[in-house]
C-alpha cells in the first residue's frame, strides 16, 4: 500500500492557537482525504483535497476552521484554527489509490494526536 | 445520507472462540463494505471488504457476510487469538464515490 506519513505525530496546544498538520505520500495521488477521530469515537470525513482546486468540505466542517492546502500530488496540509478543547482529536489523512490505481477503500496515515488545553 | 450502525460497542470473548460484529446501513445504493482494525495508538487498517454482488467472503480466520435485502453485514472472526484484540470499524460506501461512512466501532477483547 502507499506509504503515508504525517507531521507532527502529536502536539499539545493552547486554546485560541492554530496547528498545521502535514501529510506526505510516497506516490502521486489524485485525491487526499482528511478525517477526524474524536477520543473513543469513529472516523468522520472532514474534507477531500484535490490538487489545484478548493477542498470539498463535509457537512459540519468549514474552510475557516479547517483550511486545507494541496500544493502538489504528494502533499497536503490541514490547519486546525482557533482551537478549543473540543478540537482534541486524532486527525488522519488518507488516500484511495494503490500504485496509481483508484480503489474504493481508504488507506490511512499514522495520524496526528492533538490535545488542546 | 448514509448512516451506519454497529453493534456491539464492546465484545469480550475467550481465546479460541468466535467473535461476530454486526452493522446495518441505511442507503440501499451503498455497494462497498470494508472492515478496518485499529490497534491502540495505530492507524485503521483494512482487513477485509465485500461488494454488493457477493454474499460472503473469507480470508483465513476472517469472513464477512452481506445481506443486501436486510441492509446488514457482519464480520466473523474464528479461532480468536490475543492479537485480534483491537477496535473494529465497519464502513459503507458507493463504488467510485470516494466516500466512506464509518460505524461507531467495536472494542474486541480476547481473554486468554
Image: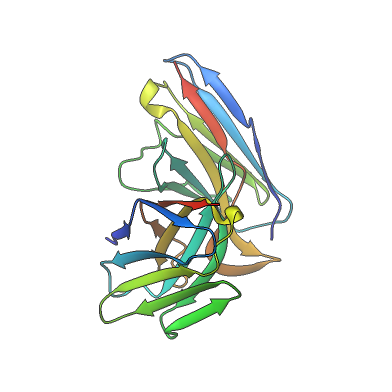
Seen in the image, is B30 located left or right of residue A104?
A: left
Whole-percent x and y of residue A46?
42, 44
Whole-percent x and y of residue B6?
33, 58
Whole-percent x and y of residue B112?
55, 52
Whole-percent x and y of residue B38?
53, 50
Of B69 and A66, the residue lying toward us: B69
Q: Quadrant of the N terminus of chain B?
A: bottom left
Seen in the image, is A21 located left or right of residue A14?
A: right
Seen in the image, is A16 located left or right of residue A106?
A: left
Instruction: Write the residue at 55% across / 42% down.
Output: B40
Of A93 and B56, the residue lying toward us: B56
Of A73 and B83, the residue lying toward us: B83
Q: Is residue B56 visible?
A: yes
Instruction: Write the residue at 68% across / 66% down.
Output: A100
The colouring scheme, among rainbow, by chain, secondary structure or one colour, is rainbow
Instruction: Write the residue at 44% across / 34% down.
Output: A66
Instruction: Write the residue at 61% across / 54% down.
Output: B83
Image quarter for residue B3? bottom left
Image quarter for residue B48? bottom right
Of A92 and A67, the residue lying toward us: A92
Seen in the picture, residue B67 relative to A97 is either above or below; the reply is below
Seen in the image, is A113 located left or right of residue B55?
A: right
Image quarter for residue B94? bottom left
Number of numbered discs visible in the structure rendering: 0
Q: Is residue A31 visible?
A: no
Amino acid at each position: 500500500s502507499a506509504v503515508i506519513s504525517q507531521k507532527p505525530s502529536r502536539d499539545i496546544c493552547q486554546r485560541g492557537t492554530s496547528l498545521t498538520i502535514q501529510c506526505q505520500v510516497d506516490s502521486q495521488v489524485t485525491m487526499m482525504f482528511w478525517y477526524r477521530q474524536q477520543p473513543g469515537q469513529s472516523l468522520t470525513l472532514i474534507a477531500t483535497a484535490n490538487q489545484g482546486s478548493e477542498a470539498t468540505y463535509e457537512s459540519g466542517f468549514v474552510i475557516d476552521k479547517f483550511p486545507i492546502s494541496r500544493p502538489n500530488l504528494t502533499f497536503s496540509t490541514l490547519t486546525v484554527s482557533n482551537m478549543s478543547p473540543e478540537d482534541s482529536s486524532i486527525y488522519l489523512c488518507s488516500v484511495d489509490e494503490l500504485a496509481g490505481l483508484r480503489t474504493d477503500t481508504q488507506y490511512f496515515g499514522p495520524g496526528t494526536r492533538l490535545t488542546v488545553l | 445520507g448514509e448512516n451506519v450502525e454497529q453493534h456491539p460497542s464492546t465484545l469480550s470473548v475467550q481465546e479460541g472462540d468466535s467473535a461476530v460484529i454486526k452493522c446495518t446501513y441505511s442507503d440501499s445504493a451503498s455497494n462497498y463494505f470494508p472492515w478496518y482494525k485499529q490497534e491502540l495508538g495505530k492507524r485503521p487498517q483494512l482487513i477485509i471488504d465485500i461488494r454488493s454482488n457477493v454474499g460472503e467472503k473469507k480470508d483465513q480466520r476472517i469472513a464477512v457476510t452481506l445481506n443486501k435485502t436486510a441492509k446488514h453485514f457482519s464480520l466473523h472472526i474464528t479461532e480468536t487469538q490475543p492479537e485480534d484484540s483491537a477496535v473494529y470499524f465497519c464502513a459503507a460506501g458507493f463504488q467510485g464515490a470516494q466516500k466512506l461512512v464509518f460505524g461507531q466501532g467495536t472494542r474486541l477483547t480476547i481473554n486468554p
